[in-house]
Amino acid sequence: MLVQQIINGIVVGSVYALTAMGATLVYGIMRILDISNAGAYAIGAYVAFFFLLQTGSPLVALVTGVALTAVFGFLVQKFLYAPLMNKSPNVSLIAGIGLFIFLQDFLRLVAGPQARELNFGTLLPSIQFPSLQLTLYGTWFLILAATALLLLILWLLLNRSPIGLAWRATAQDLETAKAMGINTNRVVAFNFILGYGFAAVAGILVGILYNSVYPTMGDVPAYKMLAVIVLGGLGNPLGTVLAALVIGMAETLIGGYVGFFLPRDAIAFVVLILILLWRPQGLLGRRRSS
Amino acid sequence: MLEIRNLNAHYGHSQVLYDISIDVKAGEFVSIIGANGAGKSTLMKVIMGLVPVSSGKLLFKGNEISRLEPWQRAGMKIAYVPEGRRVFGELTVAENLRIGGWVEPPQDLPRRVEKVVAIFPRLGERMNQAARTMSGGEQQMLAIGRALMLEPELLLVDEISMGLMPILVNRCFEVLKQLSEAGTTILLVEQNARKALGVSHRGYVLETGHIVLEGEATRLRDDDAVRRAYLGG
Ligand SMILES: Nc1ncnc2c1ncn2[C@@H]1O[C@H](COP(=O)(O)OP(=O)(O)OP(=O)(O)O)[C@@H](O)[C@H]1O
Ligand SMILES: [Mg+2]
């Protein structure tokens, strides 16, 4: 039972990590909280759902869902955030929230308000250990494997590739990075493509995990995403992974195993507040000197 | 090499540079001196493309560059040592140097690193150390070394002496002098007017956004107004 809850917590944390990674990368470079990244989560799930219905191929569905959402991220950057770049960050924040609300209503209009079943997770086998009261769901393996793979790729990209070096330099000091010859417009575009791609994967995986996609499926993740990136130290990818696991664990263990009078989502925020009281700069945040 | 004609620049609505005209010829070492807030750093940022030109001309080797992005100007071999060093603190010394040579062919970087290390051996000893953990003087060397990775045709230096011990100030000026003698064109902005005029060929005096005086460095050093205002009598 405890083992079951711990694995469940890691699975939930993995999904949070993927969800918050896009916004973390964007914050790292632009110092804005990109709420519409959580909209990308629902878009990815819907596009994948649509292509699964059309083609019957999970692979086509996954690839198109991620690719089209990544393209959408590029467009959001180009036509929403780039023109606002020299304005106050609050303007970008509000614009991002506006886009997020628009996306929800857009999906509701196009696809209807009801939840749709993805009927994909049921194809994956589960493994049961009755003596241990343990059930390992196929979707869990899928999520853990996908998360591990994506985070590994991201780590290699950021720490072992030229574009990663450009990303880290730009995140630290955009102006100096530009003056040194880094095309920061390209770094920012890459950032959004990657970030929205991550959000799409998260949305698709959550659609599979709970076997449903619906227009407002990005709501709670949007709040959680904020909690995770603040807790991780704002714009620190490693901090985001750590914070996502802490919050995923806390809400499954406290909510599911110990039992608690608050709903799961509230537990996540209680944990956030407690940790921030102890470490205001987040788990891996460093106070910025600017 | 660099021609600035009747240039104006603003931050938002407030004008900072007024009708600036400056010439830097190939191989020349030119200093701009001026008090706090005169607009020296702004001028450097305008040349680098970090602050837009409102009106006027900005020519590099005869080409108008004022519409080019900063990274395109770096691609033309204009290198910049920003005020306050601005090294990438979380990156290693090696990575900082790599970024200085960003627009150059990667296979040529090891040779350039060797050249920089020959000038600043200290950097060679700290290649894998995070820049943030180095002393102020070492960071200044890194900021200069990073700019030299470009093998620049025009080197822009904003305040080389700020916050350094006198011995390091001398070392930094000596390096600039050697670079100049080796043919690099240098535009230096300095509050330490005595030192700046001591190493450069010509100088300009910037006062609240206006060029008020220009001339041979030796002549400026002897100018009464300059002595009173910038050389302490
Ligand atoms: N980002 C900015 N936004 C608005 N005003 C600015 C900005 N940066 C500088 N200024 C203003 O422009 C003027 C010139 O500043 P600048 O930094 O160019 O001076 P400086 O000559 O380099 O001074 P110092 O010797 O202190 O470095 C100052 O009045 C300053 O307040
Ligand atoms: Mg200055």
Image: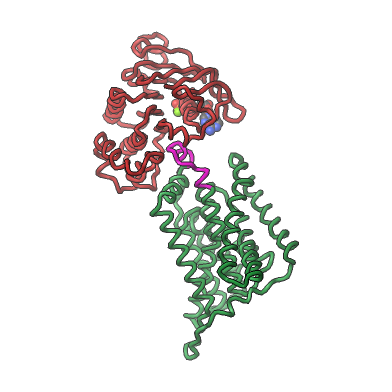
Chain colours: A green, B red
Residue A156 vertical placement versus A162 (above, below): below
Query: Which residue is drawn at the image coordinates 56% and 77% (left, top)?
Result: A256
Residue A198 position within the rendered picture, expressed as x and y whole percent measured from the top left: 54, 60
User: Looking at this view, is A111 or A195 the one in front?
Assistant: A111
Q: How many discs mark residues in the rendered view? A: 0
**Quadrant of the rendering where the C terminus of chain B is positioned:** top left
Residue B61 position within the rendered picture, expressed as x and y whole percent measured from the top left: 44, 23
User: Looking at this view, is B67 or A166 the one in front?
Assistant: B67
Say which quarter of the image contains residue A48: bottom right
**Quadrant of the rendering where the N terminus of chain B is positioned:** top left
Query: Which residue is drawn at the image coordinates 44% and 46% (left, top)?
Result: A166
Outermost residue to the bottom: A131
Q: Is residue A3 left or right of residue A107?
A: left
Say which quarter of the image contains residue A106: bottom right
Residue A262 seen by the camera: no
Residue B11 vertical placement versus B91 (above, below): above
Residue B155 position within the rendered picture, expressed as x and y whole percent measured from the top left: 38, 28
Q: Is residue A55 left or right of residue A163?
A: right
User: Looking at this view, is B65 or B56 the one in front?
Assistant: B65
Residue B202 vertical placement versus A16 (above, below): above
Query: Which residue is drawn at the image coordinates 74% and 67% (left, top)?
Result: A113
Q: Which residues are magenta?
A: A174-188
User: Looking at this view, is A41 or A288 the one in front?
Assistant: A41
Outermost residue to the front: A55
Quadrant of the image where one finds ligand 2: top left
Residue A11 position within the rendered picture, expressed as x and y whole percent measured from the top left: 51, 72
Residue B12 seen by the camera: yes
Look at the magenta stretch and give its main secondary structure: helix
The stretch drawn in magenta includes residue A114: no
The stretch drawn in magenta includes residue A187: yes
